[in-house]
């Protein structure tokens, strides 16, 4: 049985893990009360293919590119002052860029600064960033309320805005962020959402962190904007590693997250399936101990058969 992880990995393992995580986190000014984590994000047009292989590898169903591809706006991570685009998903978080948006990381006690720029020259719509789980003043809410919201709730094309947040003790965990401007409905259906992962003040980072975002694009049920084995992310780990699954959902449906051959600890024992609704999120961990090529998927059968399924590979 895979055991849920509560403690650390030992001094050497913790040191190596910390160095690996720091390498993919933004530069930060560290003080007594935490660090300042600074990110540069833009809304950019992208041509997105939900089934880039053109096939469902398990059912051997084939698709024409015209029925699986569309133009959308996504969140893209940039270097300082938006000088150049950089990978959204550092390390082993995912194996595609675009949907979802950048995985942002912080720790309890940190201040988080997100510089956002609207580069939507395709539809020329306003966009924003609304974050769950963190603490902020009204000006950083990122939601459009006519007559009340600040510029951050409806950032016009070509404009920029800076959101500021605090990661307090009750912010530990994984949380969604998404567009909450006038364009919210079109943006979310197009994949304009992401995740922020916040460690506890003294929490040891996992060796691997995987983002699983349940959504819907076109007529497909998707994981990270892709549908069917051969297109959805292939997550990889090794025996002995601590893995963390960040599971989030967006849209109108409820889902059930399941990984074959694995379970995680909860207060009353263990479980291997958990239900999640729109804008909900959770993170689970275990120490990997069995190699194999496993399935992960939504256990709502219609969702799984319409694309919400992927591969998890564990090696020695």
Image: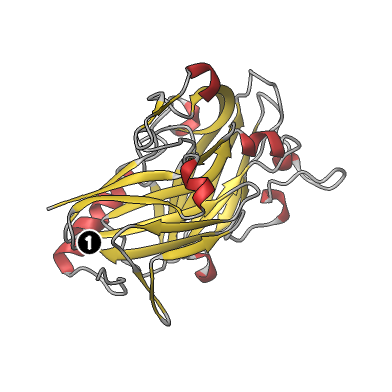
Q: Residue furthest left?
A: 316
Give the side of residue 107 with respect to residue 152, left or right: left
Residue 93 in sight in this render: no
- At a point 30% along the width and 51% down the height, the residue shown is 21
Give the side of residue 11 with respect to residue 41, left or right: left
Residue 263 in sight in this render: yes
Image spot of residue 85 (x, y percent) = 43, 27
Which residue is more in the foreground, 30 or 17?
17
Is 251 rendered above or below residue 122? below
Residue 215 falls in image quadrant: top right
- At a point 66% along the width and 39% down the height, the residue shown is 128
Q: Residues within 10 Å of mark 1 (few under 14, many from 20)?
A: many
Residue 197 falls in image quadrant: bottom left
Image spot of residue 174 (x, y percent) = 48, 58
Which residue is more in the foreground, 137 or 174?
174
Which element is circle 1 on?
A: loop
- At a point 59% along the width and 50% down the height, the residue shown is 164
Count of numbered badges drawn on the protein? 1
Image spot of residue 83 (x, y percent) = 45, 25
Which residue is more in the foreground, 120 or 187?
187
Q: Which residue is mark 1?
A: 288
Image spot of residue 175 (x, y percent) = 53, 56
């Amino acid at each position: 049985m895979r055991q849920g992880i509560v403690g650390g990995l030992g001094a050497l393992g913790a040191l190596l893990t910390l160095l690996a995580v720091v390498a993919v986190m933004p530069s930060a000014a560290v003080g007594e009360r935490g660090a300042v984590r600074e990110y540069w994000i833009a809304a950019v047009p992208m041509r997105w293919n939900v089934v880039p292989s053109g096939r469902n590898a398990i059912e051997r169903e084939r698709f024409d590119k015209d029925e699986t591809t569309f133009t959308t706006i996504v969140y893209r991570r940039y270097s300082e002052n938006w000088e150049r685009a950089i990978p959204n998903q550092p390390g082993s978080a995912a194996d595609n860029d675009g949907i979802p948006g950048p995985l942002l990381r912080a720790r309890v006690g940190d201040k988080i600064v997100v510089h956002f720029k609207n580069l939507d020259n395709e539809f020329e719509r306003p966009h924003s960033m609304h974050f769950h789980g963190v603490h902020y003043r009204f000006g950083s809410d990122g939601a459009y309320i006519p007559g009340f919201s600040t510029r951050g709730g409806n950032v016009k094309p070509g404009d920029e805005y800076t959101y500021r947040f605090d990661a307090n003790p009750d912010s530990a965990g994984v949380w969604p962020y998404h567009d909450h401007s006038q364009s919210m409905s079109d943006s979310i259906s197009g994949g304009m959402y992401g995740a922020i992962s916040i460690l506890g003040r003294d929490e040891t980072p996992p060796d691997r962190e995987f983002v699983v975002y349940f959504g819907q694009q076109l007529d497909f049920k998707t994981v990270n904007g892709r549908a069917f084995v051969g297109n959805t992310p292939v997550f990889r780990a090794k025996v002995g590693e601590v893995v963390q699954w960040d599971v989030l959902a967006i849209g109108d449906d409820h889902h059930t997250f399941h990984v074959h051959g694995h379970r995680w600890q909860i207060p009353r024992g263990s479980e291997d399936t958990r239900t999640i609704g729109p804008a909900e999120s959770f993170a689970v961990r275990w120490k990997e101990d069995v190699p194999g090529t496993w399935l992960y998927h939504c256990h709502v059968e219609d969702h799984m058969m319409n694309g919400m399924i992927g591969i998890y590979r564990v090696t020695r």
